[in-house]
Amino acid sequence: MQGAELNIDPLAEILDGDEAMSPEAVLGAFVALYSVPEVVPPSVWLPVVLGEKDLGDNPGPAITALMDLYNNIGDRLESKGMFCPPPDEHDSIRDFCAGYIEILGLEQEWVEQEAELAFILMSLVDPSVLDDPEVSIDIDPDQWLDYAREDLLAVLEEIYLRNRGQAPGQARPAQSTKVNRNAPCPCGSGRKYKKCCGAS
């Protein structure tokens, strides 16, 4: 994980099997839970994370481990900022984004507000969405996915800070100043950044 210092090894045993999220998906889900504008209670997100997983007669230790990780991620985001899998770990990014999307699904209004983020996440989980004739990305899909993986950390951090009522850069002095390729160019030309100053 980029900048992460979280031990997710205990999750492997708790979430073993196909019934629950993978450990990387849980990290994505927990990051999303701290990024949505409204608090989502454990009674809502635990069934999403666990899926059909049967925790047996004594679910307490597993629930405690998940709650501890949830709280640790909140502390980690507050003190050190956003994290996600490195761009070259494609499977981890896919699972992380899938977990994030599961939480987005609980907040439909937020999905509509963050349509660009939702599209980035969906394409990283299922690149076939880029084959849709209604999707226009102006560059080769593989190249677009590389850009999306590279930009994921900055995009997630921007969303997190905005929904905490902070301007990007307010919480961490080292905040990225990178311009989104599809955003209007800061020079004021009216063209997209990638077609203007970002083309060089």
Image (spheres, helix red, strand yellow):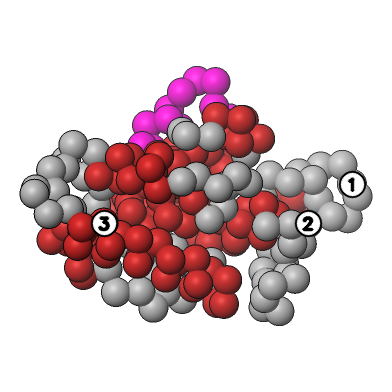
Q: Is residue 8 magenta?
A: no
Q: Nearer the viewer, residue 145 or 53?
A: 53
Q: What stretch is highlighted in magenta?
A: 124-137
Percent from the top left, x then y, of residue 72? 42, 70
**Sequence-earlier tag: 3 or 1:** 3
Distance between mark 2 and mark 3 Cα atoms: 50 Å
Q: Is mark 1 on a helix, strand or loop?
A: loop
Q: Residue at x 87, y 42 (%)?
A: 190
Q: Nearer the viewer, mark 3 or mark 1?
A: 3
Which residue is depicted at the point 61% across and 57% down?
160
Q: Mark 2 vs mark 3: which is more N-terminal?
A: 3
Q: How far across and down, in percent of the image, does residue 108 sit?
A: 55, 29
Q: Within the magenta stretch, is there residue 130?
A: yes
Q: Position of residue 49 (x, y in %)?
A: 30, 45
Circle 1 packing at 10 Å, graded few (<14), some (14-19), many (20+), is few
Q: Is residue 121 visible?
A: no
Reading the image, the residue beneath label 3 is: 63
Say which residue label 2 marks.
Answer: 197
Label at residue 189: 1
Q: Position of residue 77 (x, y in %)?
A: 53, 69
Which quarter shows the N terminus? bottom left
Q: Which amino acid does label 1 sit on?
A: Ser
Among all residues in the image, which is located at the extreme left?
57
C-alpha gap between disc 3 and disc 1: 53 Å
Q: Is residue 100 left or right of residue 200?
A: left
Amino acid identity at mark 3: Ile
Q: Does 82 appear above or below 102?
A: below
Q: What element carries label 2?
A: helix
Q: Determine contact: label 1, label 2, CB under 8 Å.
A: yes
Q: Residue at x 38, y 42 (%)?
A: 43
